[in-house]
Image (cartoon, rainbow, N blue to C red):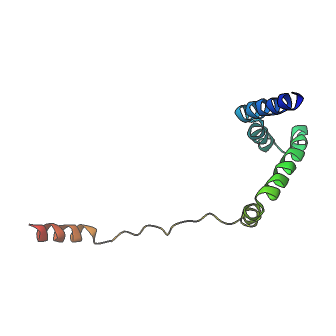
Amino acid sequence: MTTTLAVAAALVAGYVLGRYQPSPRLLRWAEGQTRGTVRYWLAQPILAVAILVLLCTRPRTTIRNWKHRNDPPHREPALTFDPNWAENRRRAAKEQS
């Protein structure tokens, strides 16, 4: 009976934690702290634990993201416009008629 109650309590606790989701809220708080404040230094162990959890659960992705964190953003080449667009449009209109 004790084992059944312990399992039921664990299931209820897991459900409540899953619905409340304290870890994303805590991480959002920790990421939003400004340097030079006491809260910033209180947030550092929280962020360190989050990084360690990511390294343990998804090492390849975490290391790849860390290596590429300072890459410049990908940009498409600039658009170029045909300087003779009006003439080409008139020609195409005449060909259709």
9 with respect to 91 (left or right): right
Q: Residue 67's image quarter?
A: bottom right
Q: Residue 82's image quarter?
A: bottom left
Residue at x-position 84% and y-position 28%? 5
Q: Where is residue 81 in the image (x, y as percent from the top left)?
A: 36, 68
77 or 43: nearer the viewer: 43
83 or 3: nearer the viewer: 3
Residue, far left: 97
- Number of callouts in the render? 0
Tell me the quarter of the image containing the N terminus.
top right
Q: Where is residue 37 in the image (x, y as percent from the top left)?
A: 88, 40
91 or 38: nearer the viewer: 38
Residue at x-position 32% and y-position 71%? 83
Tell me the quarter of the image containing the C terminus.
bottom left
Residue at x-position 86% and y-position 44%? 46
Q: Position of residue 10 (x, y in %)?
A: 82, 33
74 with respect to 86 (left or right): right
Q: Position of residue 62 (x, y in %)?
A: 76, 60
Q: Is residue 64 above or below residue 2?
A: below
37 with respect to 28 (left or right): right
